[in-house]
Each structure stands twice: as C-alpha cells, then as structure tokens.
Amino acid sequence: MPRLIPVAPPTGGTPSYRGAARLREALRMGFGAALMLAAAACAGCGTAPLPDDDLVTGSIKPKPIALKLPLGDTPKGIAASDWLAAKLALDQALVSADADISVPWENADTGARGTATPIGAQRIGGCRDFMIAVVDGKVADRWIHGEACRSREGTVLSQVRVLGRA
C-alpha cells in the first residue's frame, strides 16, 4: 500500500492537488481490494454441490388413471395375462380411425404375442367383429373371434370363441 504523505493545505484551506490525487488513489485501491476479497469469498458459493431433495410437498396431487379395458371373460385355453394384453391391443385397434389396422400385442411374462384386428365396418349399435391371433409356442397358434360393442360404459366383448389354428 502506498505511503501517504500529509501535505499542508494552502492558505485557502483545501488540500493540494497532489494530496487529493493520493487520497483518491488510496481509496480506489482500498475499494478494489475489498471488492476482490468479497469476490474470492463468494467464489465457491455457486459451485458447491447441493444434495438431491427427495422432499414431497403434496402441492401436486397424483391422479389415478383408470384404464377402461374391454369387458369379457377369458376364453378357455388362453392365459388371463395374455388375454389382458390382447384386449388392450384390441381396444387400441377399435378406436383407431384406420379401417385396416392390426395392432400387435405381446406379453413379456409368458412370451405370448399376436395381433388384434377389427373386421368389417362398425354396425348400428356400435358393434364390430374382431379377430385376435395368439402365438405362445406351447400349443398350436390360435385365432380368437368375437364381437366388440362400444357404449358409454366402455367396450363389451361377446360371442368370444377360440377357432383353432391361425
């Protein structure tokens, strides 16, 4: 730090030009040093890792989703979990605007797979025939045929029967 030398003020009572310049320089250096110290002290603040916050506040309430599956009993010879996967694919196929759609399905738990295909146009009353292919590797590939009728309550499957080899 520079050494300050007191300068006697001239007769007007104000310090000399040199004394004022030295005072300004000393203040500037002091302010600069204080600013550097403050910057150095805060340098680590933004880079410190913060732990993940797993706090759940409840400000957003989860809403359960009710998946409306087509209603209908599981046909004989078809595993219930396979029928569930096939019904999900059939529901997607029935709501599609595409007239010639076949929606694939697969059950990773059992290894079964197939396709769900609506057949023909929708009839009066909201009903439409469907075919579901089932390939499980345990028995011969099969077709399931039935009728799906859509209503306000959901889709109801009726006249469901296993046809045999696909």
Image (cartoon, rainbow, N blue to C red):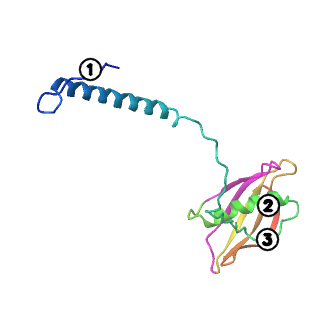
Estimate the spatial distance between the alpha carbons at disc 3 and disc 2, rounded to whole Å.
Answer: 10 Å
Tell me if residue 53 is in the magenta stretch: no
Q: Which residue is mark 3?
A: 72
Q: Residue at x 17, y 28 (%)?
A: 9
Which quadrant would residue 57 be assigned to in this image?
bottom right
Q: Which residue is mark 2?
A: 83
Quadrant for the N terminus, please: top left
Q: Which residues are magenta?
A: 101-124
First in residue order: circle 2 vs circle 1:
1
Horizontal relation, residue 136 to residue 49: left or right? right
Tell me the amino acid under the disc marked 1: Ile
> Circle 1 sits in a helix, a strand or a loop, which is it?
loop
Tell me the amino acid under the disc marked 2: Trp
Q: Position of residue 87 (x, y in %)?
A: 74, 63
16 in relation to 132, above or below: above
| Outermost residue, left side | 12
Q: Position of residue 163 (x, y in %)?
A: 81, 62
Q: Report whether residue 164 is seen.
A: no
Q: Position of residue 47 (x, y in %)?
A: 53, 34
Front one among 116 and 59: 59
> Circle 2 sits in a helix, a strand or a loop, which is it?
helix
Disc 2 packing (10 Å; few <14; some 14–19; many ≥20): some
Estimate the spatial distance between the alpha carbons at disc 2 and disc 1, rounded to whole Å.
Answer: 98 Å
